[in-house]
Image (cartoon, rainbow, N blue to C red):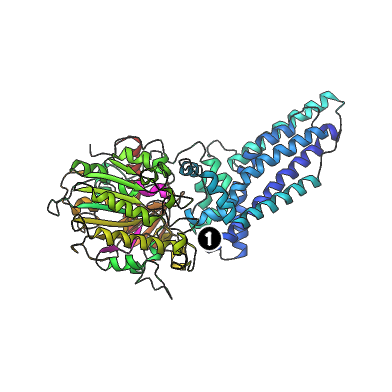
Amino acid sequence: MQKHLRLNEYKVLFYRLSLAYLFYFIARVLFYLYNADLLRVESFSDFMALSYYGLAFDTTAILYVNLLFIVFSTLPLWKNTNRGYQKFLFYFYFVTNLLIYATNFIDFIYYKFTFARTTIVALDVIKHETNKSKLFLNFLFEYWHVFILFVISAILWIYLYKKVTVKSFKPVKIISYFGFSIIGFLVIALLTIGGIRGGDFKKSTRPINLLDASRHVKNIVQSDLVLNTPFAIFRTLFTNGFAKVKYEGVNQKVINSLVQPIKTYNNNPKTKPNIVVFIIESYGREYIGAFNKDSNISNYQSHAPFIDSLAQHSMIFTNAYANGRQSIHGMSSVLGGIPSFKDAFTSSPYPKQKIESLVSTLKGEGYDTSFFHGAANGSMGFLGFSKILGIDHYYGRTEFNDDSQFDGFWGIWDEPFLQYMEKTLDKKKTPFFASVFTVSSHEPYNIPQKYTSRFKEGGVPIHKCVEYTDFALKRFFAEAKKKPWFENTIFVLVADHCNQIFYDEYQKPMNRYAVPILIYKPDSKYVGVDNDWAQQIDIYPTLLDMIGYDKPFRSWGRSLLDKKSSQPFVINSTGTIYQFAKGNYICTFDGKNVIGFYDKNDKALKFNLIKNRNAEMNQIELHCKAFIEDYMNRVMDKKLTTN
């Protein structure tokens, strides 16, 4: 009778699924060991508590992956227990499980660059790259230890799987066999549905999502330890992060007052200087000494001597932040004034619309517009987005046309490519606008062979690349200053996002978005240090204010020169949580509810002040909600213009 109940088969199925839980736990331990400095778990008991909360997310991922395996294991197919069928289940189980399980191992390393679990959006980032196989092989070579850990885990998993087998038998009592099989299948199906939803069978409760990982953590960064990468991928597979919201207390009057999506400036006389914007790959504020004079970091060392010298004659913003986490977010934030939150705007269904931007407004003023990127044309989606913005000329690896200067992975080395850019600008009719997105300060952290003895690795591998790119900028300015267009040009330096961290100060959750913003004009019109909140989306309105642009324009940022009509603020997202900083506080918001308020100097988000709410906190919450509501409405309704 027990055979016809199929109890042995169900026990073995339970064992095989339990193995997945064991190895997801092992992956969580390894993920923590690789990223302990970022996750900041205080004790073993805290880690175990986070792992316990992670079981719900592991369950969803494991059941998604093994859905068909469970079906094949429980259907009454008569031959379920024979050797051939069990061999089929073995291969099906490991092909599906190991393929998805490997994504956890990728995040052992990739998390250090994005500060978030990898989602399906990552595929949008790499789909434009022409050298995917080479990048993958380099990852295996550079981080061989991760690959070895994966292989060891796979071998151990297979060994344990084979330790428990299904006992072979041939059903005789057909009615009993089918009857018990149907009951067993329905029970298992019900449990599987509940598990995929996160252990909840209520219709009123939606399946768990990425935000739910933040419910039980002491610090929001620990939510990434609760999560696993397969879950993050599955939950974003058929969704996008854009959805209209309606918050209580937010109306158009509030939006116009706090967000001010349509702006007009009349602060400066109308001029037409050239504008050159450097978006520097992975160039965190941490690396530049001029931005760290008041950081109180013991034994601090700068890796950007040229930028340090340029900063003495520039306006610099020492409390500036990125509005996204990846390179694909940087171009839309800086040039389009459009931040990216859960998903990149450029990877969403909505970028193909008319966008009022720094590019479009300058084109309206008679500027020739160019974008330079030394990678393969189309890399990161920049070529497509440049066309949407209306950029006149795109200069990439194709136009450079000399692969002897190719770094072997991403694009043309920064030094020769910036020299190419300078020579190209020499031929431009003024006024012109040009932006360049550099490539060399990027994993796998290579520099030209001739400079290996000049630029040293320092505390982390990227330091030598930072120094090389700083040198490339120095060479650009040395040539440009000889040209007639140089004196009448505004230069902006900003990073797309941060990268490898050396100092603890920049391990803090807020400071993981800390980027430099520097504005330089050779006549020294703009000089000084500004310690107030600043962000990438402020660059677009700031430049229009500087040139005396007096027409209304759409912008979620604010002019960094304007100290009267709007208050400085910063908004970005961890992927699941919004961070909104203004005045004396940093607010964390999960899209529905505020989950924390922190002092403006508590960049570690360590001391939650939410129990002591005051009027300023309430106003910050309202501003955050108004921003998000207007952002979603304008993006989805295709209203990214003045009218």
Q: Which quadrant of the rendered structure holds the C terminus?
A: top left
Q: Residue at x 56, y 65 (%)?
A: 42
Q: Is residue 241 visible?
A: yes
Q: Is residue 618 above or below residue 601?
A: above
- Measuring 39% from the left and 73% from the top, which residue is drawn there? 296
Q: Quadrant of residue 66?
A: top right
**Residue 192 falls in image quadrant:** top right
Residue at the farthest top position: 175
Q: Secondary structure at mark 1?
A: helix
The residue lying at 23 percent from left, 39 percent from top is: 642
Looking at the picture, which amino acid does disc 1 mark? Leu
- Residue 388: give x, y in percent of width and height: 32, 38
Q: Position of residue 7 (x, y in %)?
A: 81, 37
Nearest the viewer among 465 and 511 is 465
Measured as percent of width and height from the top left, residue 34 is found at 58, 60
Instruction: Work out whether residue 300 or residue 472 is closer to the camera in this orientation and state it.
Output: 472
Is there any visible trace of residue 607 in the rendered image? no
Numbered marks: total = 1
- Residue on which disc 1 sits: 39
Please report the residue visible at 28 percent of the width from the left and 63 percent of the height from the top.
Answer: 316
Badge 1: residue crowd in 10 Å (few <14, some 14–19, many ≥20):
many
- In the image, taking residue 316 as reference, residue 213 lies left or right, namely right
Query: In the current view of this chain or complex, which residue is farthest to the left?
Result: 269
Looking at this view, name the residue that lies furthest to the bottom.
299
Q: Which residues are magenta?
A: 314-331
